[in-house]
Amino acid sequence: MQDAYLRWFKGKVKKAMTHYQMICDGDRVAVGLSGGKDSMALLQVLHMIRREVPVRYDLHAIFINPGWPMDVDIMADFCRQRDIPFTNKLTDIGEVVFIERQEKNPCALCANLRRGAINNTARALGLNKLALGHHLDDAIETFMMSLIYTGQFRTFSPVTYMDRSNITLIRPLIYITGQTVETFVERYGLPVVKSLCPVNGKTKREEMKKLVEMLDERYPDLKTRFLTAFQTFDPQNLWPPMVSRHPARGDICKGEGVKNKIE
């Protein structure tokens, strides 16, 4: 018999999948595997759920190999034990980002190259959905980065259709916090492959992670409030768009029934 924690964890994932219609009958789902706790937890829970739901779907794990040493065998064995096809796609992303381009802020370029590589690989394998291990903390951190560094209210969506590749990107862990994922991995002994990225732990996202953790300690309901805000966002609660950045002399301003002439 399954323990209550496992049922609760799977229930959260099933709820997200249902609310945003992430997987349909007959879907062929690529799971972006990095070896980290998030992607390993995602593959495990999708593997478990597909034996319980009426919707039939296939899984295929894809690892975009950046070209630096990685213990790929751990991921390959993990997939083999669950009878999940595994593709190790070797790329030169590491060389391009850190040697050829010598990017000072390499994460954006690396993410774009990895996204292109996994989309192309999934399409070549005949897969129509791509599941990524982004969770609620990632959505909050993305929102904070956008606010602080670009002055915009933006984060990623639970479901995104990419017309260029004809693949739909899904994030089934969107209702789960990072700490919950970590607990799941530790509780059920899932293997984790350490990241050897040269800037691991030194990025702007890491700064946002620490900021969110600090705020969460002070305001324990912060992440739940963020989830509610993402689900119920109403643009009408913010400022309206500017009519004109440079109004012409004599333009009429309209507001709450009062008309004023600009002199």
Image (tube, rainbow, N blue to C red):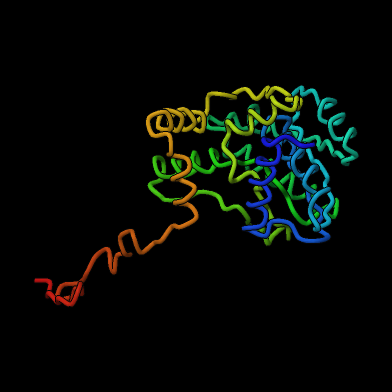
Left or right of residue 221: residue 73: right
Quarter holding residue 263:
bottom left
Residue 221, above or below 75 = below
Image x and y of residue 79, in percent = 85, 35
The residue nearer to you, when weighing 256 against 205, is 256
Residue at the outermost left position = 263
Residue at x 68%, y 50% (from the top left corner): 14
Q: Is residue 68 left or right of residue 207?
A: right
Residue 258 x %, y %: 14, 75
On-image quarter of the N terminus: top right
Q: Is residue 89 above or below residue 197?
A: below
Q: Residue at x 85, y 55 (%)?
A: 126
Which quadrant of the structure image shows residue 92? top right
Residue drawn at x 76%, y 33% is 65
Q: Residue at x 70, y 29 (%)?
A: 185
Q: How many numbered discs?
A: 0
Q: Position of residue 38 (x, y in %)?
A: 67, 34
Q: Is residue 90 above or below residue 165?
A: above
In the rendered image, the vertical position of residue 133 relative to residue 211, given as above or below: below
* View extreme (front): residue: 1
Q: Position of residue 90 (x, y in %)?
A: 80, 34
